[in-house]
Amino acid sequence: MSAAPRADEILRAYSATEMSPTSDAAEPDHEQIAHAIQVAIYRAMTPQQRMQQALRMNRTMRELLSAGYRFRNPGWTEDQLKRAVAERILHARTG
């Protein structure tokens, strides 16, 4: 991975986020700051690094889903777990 983003890059990314001008908060929202940092880190990555990260995130998501199904259904076989994970992903909704 390339060098980590510098503080000024993170601040620029943060200032570019959709902060509401009518916000009452004197302090910035922690979620917005985290998002800005995450965006700066991803922008510093090469396309290959971003793809590798996406594949790691996908693998982690599948492992977490499988662990959840395994915990709730201890008698299931590995094939049943794989099928449940695949169906969950296939029928996933966002929003």
Image (cartoon, rainbow, N blue to C red):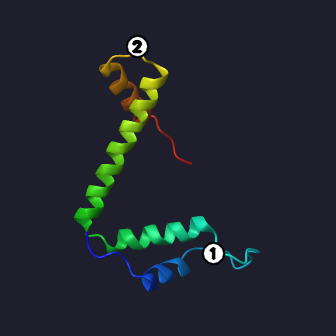
Residue 40: quarter of image: bottom left
Q: Residue at x 44, y 67 (%)?
A: 38
At label 2, the amino acid type is: Gly
Lateral position of residue 2 relative to residue 12, left or right: left
Q: Mark 2: which secondary structure? A: loop
Residue 60 placed where, x, y %?
36, 44
Disc on res. 33? none
| Disc 2: CA contacts within 10 A as few (<14), some (14-19) or many (>=20) | few
Residue under label 2 = 75
| Disc 1: CA contacts within 10 A as few (<14), some (14-19) or many (>=20) | few
N-terminal-most mark, 1 or 2? 1
Residue 77 placed where, x, y %?
33, 17
Please determine whether, in this image, residue 71 is positioned above or below residue 24: above
Residue under label 1 = 19
Q: Mark 1: which secondary structure? A: loop
At label 1, the amino acid type is: Met
Which residue is outermost to the bottom? 8
Distance (Cα) linking label 1 and label 2: 49 Å
Nearer to us: label 1 or label 2: 2
Residue 92 placed where, x, y %?
47, 38
